[in-house]
Amino acid sequence: MAPAELVAATFGFAYILLAIRQHRACWIAGAVGTAIYAKVFLDAGLPMQAALQVVYVAMAAYGYFAWRRDQGRSAPVRRWTLAQHVLALAAVGFATFVSAPLAAEHALAAAPVADSLGTWASVVATWLLARRVVENWLWWIAVDAGLAALFAAQGLLPTAALYLAYALLAAAGWRRWRREAAA
């Protein structure tokens, strides 16, 4: 358990709590935590997750500015149709099909399929959060539970615990945002 992992996990926990409350500072906490996690995951043999952290930093900047126009009030949340989710799942499946063999062959990935699947599903879930789509939380429940298992297998126990907490907190986010969408 490296100190960097604990610091990243702390920022990650702050990120999810602030995101549930739709507080714009979630994107700052997320950027700091993911910047640290890039190195943690690279050292753990998860190159796709490491690369994802770089994408997260960019997505954090996008989310921060996207939520800026709503400063002082919560923007309305929106819903996606089933067809949109099926299309997104197909895209995740295709991206995983393409990237997993590359990660296995060229990046010395410890778990190329799980690493790739978790990465691409996380990209979609982050995009949904930044766009304030209610169902982002359902994506996160599934993604975080799967990644918790992957991280535990890689010996990243504080990170695995964080991702289990993320999955539970995502359920709370789902309830809160769904109520808001119905109001």
Image (cartoon, rainbow, N blue to C red):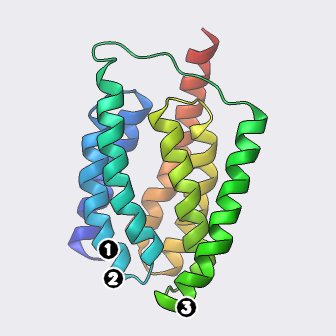
Residue type, numbered disc 2 = Asp
> Which residue is rendered at x = 39% and y = 27% of the image?
22
For the residues labelled 2 and 1, say whether their Cβ atoms are less than 8 Å apart: yes
Q: Which residue is mark 3?
A: 105
152 to 52, vertically: above or below:
below
Quarter of the image where one finds residue 112:
bottom right
Farthest top residue?
183
Quarter of the image where one finds residue 181:
top right
Image side of residue 92 versus residue 30, left or right: right
Residue 152 position within the rendered picture, expressed as x and y whole percent measured from the top left: 50, 74
SS of the residue under disc 2: helix
Q: Which residue is mark 2?
A: 43
* Residue 111 visible in the snapshot: no
Q: Nearer the viewer, residue 128 or 29?
A: 128
Question: How many C-alpha atoms fall within 10 Å of the one at disc 2: few (<14), some, or many (≥20)?
Answer: few
Quarter that holds the N terminus = bottom left
Image side of residue 3 versus residue 179, left or right: left
Residue 155 position within the rendered picture, expressed as x and y whole percent measured from the top left: 44, 80
Quarter of the image where one finds residue 180:
top right
CA gap, disc 3 and disc 2: 18 Å
* Residue 104 visible in the snapshot: yes
SS of the residue under disc 1: helix
Q: Which residue is mark 1?
A: 40
Q: Nearer the viewer, residue 74 or 144?
A: 74
CA gap, disc 1 and disc 3: 21 Å
SS of the residue under disc 3: helix
138 to 57, vertically: above or below:
above
